Image (spheres, helix red, strand yellow):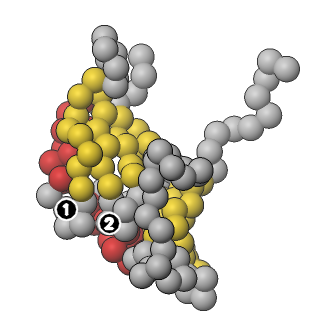
Amino acid sequence: MTTALTTGVHHVGLALPDIDAARDFFRDALGYQVVGGVPDYPAHFVSDGTSLITLWQVSDPETATPFDRKMNIGLHHLAIGVADETALAAVFERVSAWPGVAIEFAPCPMGEGSAVRHFICFIPGGARVEFATPFG
């Protein structure tokens, strides 16, 4: 088969201990819009106009197991694209100062000789998120 049967990622769902803090991060730090939610689930839906992210509340944050990228099966990280290196620097400046964010590493090349630059952080609630410039 040479033609993909899919059109890309429709949305990504993150299970978090505090979806209000995560919603505020995406909305206030990154400029996402809140585009819906399910109060009884509970969940918030946020979008940058291209990507949709669902933020799902875990039932018991006190006993929830934090993700360990080397030990757990599942989402290793969410990678979000930025327009260019200037945008990456602006996102890094805003995100690194945001309450509840832990920077794993600062902007750097994705690999030796790579033109792609990126950084990874843990957002409020502990999900691992990468921000990266375009390939090419």
Q: Where on the picture, by quarter, is residue 123?
A: bottom left
Residue 5 at x, y = what percent? 80, 34
Q: Which quadrant, please, contains the C terminus?
A: top left
Residue that appears at 42% across and 82% down: 62
Amino acid at pointer 2: Pro
Query: Is disc 2 placed on a helix, strand or loop?
Result: loop
* Residue 53 shows in this picture: yes
**As drawn, which residue projects farthest toward the top?**
113
Q: CB atoms at circles 1 and 2 under 8 Å apart? A: yes
Position of 39 relative to 44 (above/below): below
Position of 1 relative to 39 (above/below): above
| Side of 101 where 22 appears, left or right | right
Amino acid at pointer 1: Trp
Residue 105 at x, y = what percent? 23, 40
- 1 or 2: tag closer to the N-terminus: 1
Residue 125 at x, y = what percent? 37, 68
Residue that appears at 46% across and 47% down: 69
Number of marks in the rendered image: 2
**In this figure, which residue is indicated by the disc labeled 2?**
124
Q: 115 or 75: which is nearer to us?
A: 75
Q: Which quadrant, please, contains the N terminus?
A: top right
Q: Where on the picture, by quarter, is residue 79?
A: top left
| Side of 91 where 2 appears, left or right | right
Q: Which mark is residue 98?
A: 1
